[in-house]
Amino acid sequence: MPSANDLYRLVYLSRNALRGTGAPMRKEIEQILAAARRNNSRLGVTGALMFNAGCFAQVLEGTHDSIQSTFERIQCDPRHSHVTVLAFEPAARRGFGDWSMAYVGEQPIASDEFKHFELESGFDAAKLTGERVFELLREHLLEAEAAAS
Ligand code: FAD
């Protein structure tokens, strides 16, 4: 039984069900991020979201209960489908402790590598690991931070 303070990490992939491109699409993503940041900071949930035209990948970190309640809402969201959990397990520390929800999408490298994931795996979650997706999101976030400084 998880204790109330144990740290957990959930990693999932899903298919984008948003329509449109360009500015309308960006607006939809901004709305998702705004709700995520508002709710996550209240619950002590941190993480990162990656988006490209086809898929979302997201890492959620927090207590077992806070992740569970957050993920229950996310799973029901019609803006994506085929939600596939790659990992939900205890974590030693947060990988995205400074972000209520970091956004890692729409970067050329991230998109290319993510596309590769999609093609390579045929969206077969058995061929991906939560650890790999977690590392990928962290790598791209650190790269973006270094580029911005
Ligand atoms: P509001 O944001 O006020 O929304 C009210 C209701 O309307 C909700 O049921 C919502 O799902 C629905 N809704 C709002 N806008 C739209 C729209 N454009 N199309 C269809 N339905 C809509 N939430 C988090 O709290 N944390 C996260 O980390 C998080 N990550 C997400 C990642 C992805 C890929 C997606 C698609 C959604 C994510 N969400 C996240 C949003 C989540 O699914 C819920 O929409 C949100 O938690 C509801 O927040 P709220 O109760 O403040 O309601």
Image: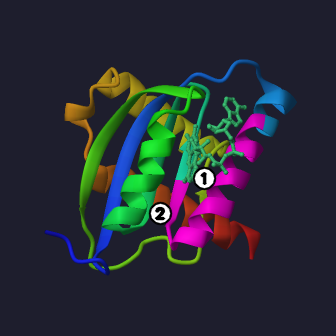
Residue 90 percent coordinates (x, y) = 23, 68
Q: In percent of the image, x 57 and y 64: which residue is there?
A: 40
Q: Which residue is at 31% across, 65% downward? A: 64
For marks 2 and 1, give the CA distance: 9 Å
Residue closer to the observer: 61 or 55? 61
- Amino acid on which disc 1 is placed: Val
- Answer whether residue 1 is magenta in the image: no
Residue 136 in the image: state x and y as whole percent: 43, 54
Structural crowding at the residue carrying mark 1, measured as other residues with C-alpha within 10 Å and reported as few (<14), some (14–19) or many (≥20): many
Label 1 residue near ligand 1, CB within 8 Å: no
* Apparent side of residue 125 relative to residue 29 in the rendered image (left or right): left
Q: Which residue does the numbered mark 2 point to in the structure image?
A: 138
Q: Secondary structure at mark 1?
A: loop
Residue density around tag 2, few if under 14, some if 14–19, many if 20 or more, within 10 Å: some
Question: Mark 2 belongs to which amino acid?
Answer: Arg
- The residue lying toward the viewer, choosing from 130 and 18, is 18
Query: Of 99 and 147, which appears nearest the observer?
Result: 99
Q: Secondary structure at mark 2?
A: helix
Is 30 one of the magenta-colored residues?
A: yes
| Res. 139 in view | no
Span colored in magenta: 28-48
Where residue 55 appears, as percent x and y from the top left, is 51, 31
Q: Is mark 2 within 8 Å of ligand 1?
A: no
Q: Is residue 45 above or below residue 15?
A: below
Q: How is the image coloured?
A: rainbow
Decide which of 3, 93 is in the foreground and name it.
Answer: 3
Vertical relation: 47 (above or below) 2: above
First in residue order: circle 2 vs circle 1: 1
Give the residue drawn at x 27%, y 26%.
Answer: 124
Disc marking residue 104:
1
